[in-house]
Amino acid sequence: MKLLFVLFNYFPHGGQQRNCLRIAQKCALAGHDISICVRTWEGPRPDGIAVETLGCRGWTNAGRNQNFINDLSDFTNRGAFDGIIAFSKMPGLDLYFASDPCFEAKYRHNKSWLGKLTRRYRLYRGWEEAVFAKGNRTQILLITDREVPLYQEIYGTEPERFHLLPPNIDHRTFSETERGSACLAKRGELGLPAEATLLLMVGSGFRTKGVDRAIEGLAKLQSPEKNEAHLVVIGNGKTEGYLRLAKSLGVSSRVHMLGGRTDVPDWMLATDLLVHPARSENTGAVLLEALANGLPLLVSDVCGYAFHIERANAGRLVPSPFDQSQFNRLLQETVYSPDLSQWSSNGLKYAAEEDLYSCHEKARDLIEKYVIARAR
């Protein structure tokens, strides 16, 4: 089959982007002719998969996305694709991989009515409705079902169009020798002693992930003498405001913003705690990756995958509504908890027993099923 995968922007370290590429690669390995269409592409292009860029013009992000959708319609009409699979909401899809929260629900609960008068609102609302409206043909692949009631309430989406997938992390094996080597190597990279306490944050979109919350918590930590904790932040984003915050709080020497990295698993072996005080998080694959690396966690309960942390007993949850003082206290208690070793063991056991790995294979199977069914 000739399949087209679509998303607005591709960059190597985004969860949505990695899912798109890996599922496309699974379909290519199954013998299908695969193309990926984006507005922008960063990083190396995959072997054996055609990459097309369209619609990179306009004054606003919403306008550029609409130009991309317009150009995509012309492109697909010429390309005679058997199926179109998108990771961004837009019209004309056979399957949509849902990784973003419900746009309309945010406006109903958190936004001023004036926002509904903007072109941005009309565009994003229209793209979402084109996927979820009752009677539409688009099949919806999910990695968490927490937003399903919202879509059904707002758009009347039929329940049979939702297909829940398992998570999508890589299998991870390592020895304690490898863990020890990573601990020394990564502390050495930062110029820190072997006994230094390291907190880790991973993810792009620093405000959404709560980097400011973590920096404020770091500043309030009461550390044992000569063992002040350091915060390592890995991900793409604008760092200037967070570095200014760290400086104003007197912790600039203990905040290390490293940008996007390909060695995240090694940092998970090397650090003492994953800190993820996110403001919102549809799923949070990084939480499961931490489990599989035996890294204890302190995580906002708003994260879609937070229930795995609770079920595994692999760390602590930050309750909603978020309160900075409460987070500071929880961070203090968690970083220096005698339970860290047990949480690490619990996470490894959970990752060994649960299916946290087959998302991409199951997605490929559903793509084949529904594209073939449509062709009949």
Image (spheres, grey):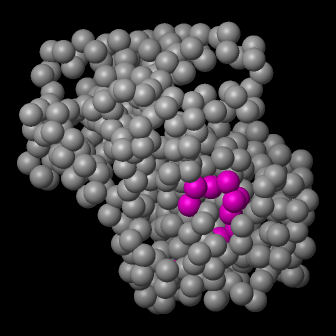
| Secondary structure predominantly adopted by residues drawn in magenta | loop
Q: Can you give x and y, in whole percent of width and height, for residue 368 in the image?
A: 17, 46
Q: Nearer the viewer, residue 24 or 191?
A: 24
Q: Can you give x and y, in whole percent of width and height, for residue 107 in the image?
A: 68, 27
What residue appears at the point 54 percent right and 10 percent down from the top-left corner? 59
Question: In which quadrant of the rendered view does residue 367 lie?
Answer: top left
Q: Tell me: residue 175, above or below residue 163.
A: below
- Magenta includes 348? no
Question: Does 141 sit left or right of 230 as displayed?
Answer: left
Q: Tell me: residue 71, above or below residue 202.
A: above
Q: Can you give x and y, in whole percent of width and height, for residue 178 in the image?
A: 45, 84
- What residue span does the magenta drawing correspond to? 294-305
What residue appears at the point 83 percent right and 76 percent down from the top-left corner? 333
Is residue 30 visible in the rendered structure shown here?
A: yes
What residue appears at the point 40 percent right and 53 percent down from the top-left corner? 164
Q: Tell me: residue 187, above or below residue 114.
A: below
Number of disc labels: 0
What residue appears at the point 27 percent right and 32 percent down from the top-left corner? 94
Please state, as top left, top right, bottom left or bottom right, where the N terminus lies in the image: top left
Question: In which quadrant of the rendered view does residue 320 lie?
Answer: bottom right
Q: Nearer the viewer, residue 172 or 12?
A: 172
Please state, as top left, top right, bottom left or bottom right, where the C terminus lies in the image: top left
Q: Nearer the viewer, residue 180 or 315?
A: 315
- Magenta includes 301? yes
Q: Can you give x and y, in whole percent of width and height, for residue 207 in the image?
A: 70, 42
Is residue 253 visible in the rendered structure shown here?
A: no
Question: Does 267 sit left or right of 111 as displayed?
Answer: left
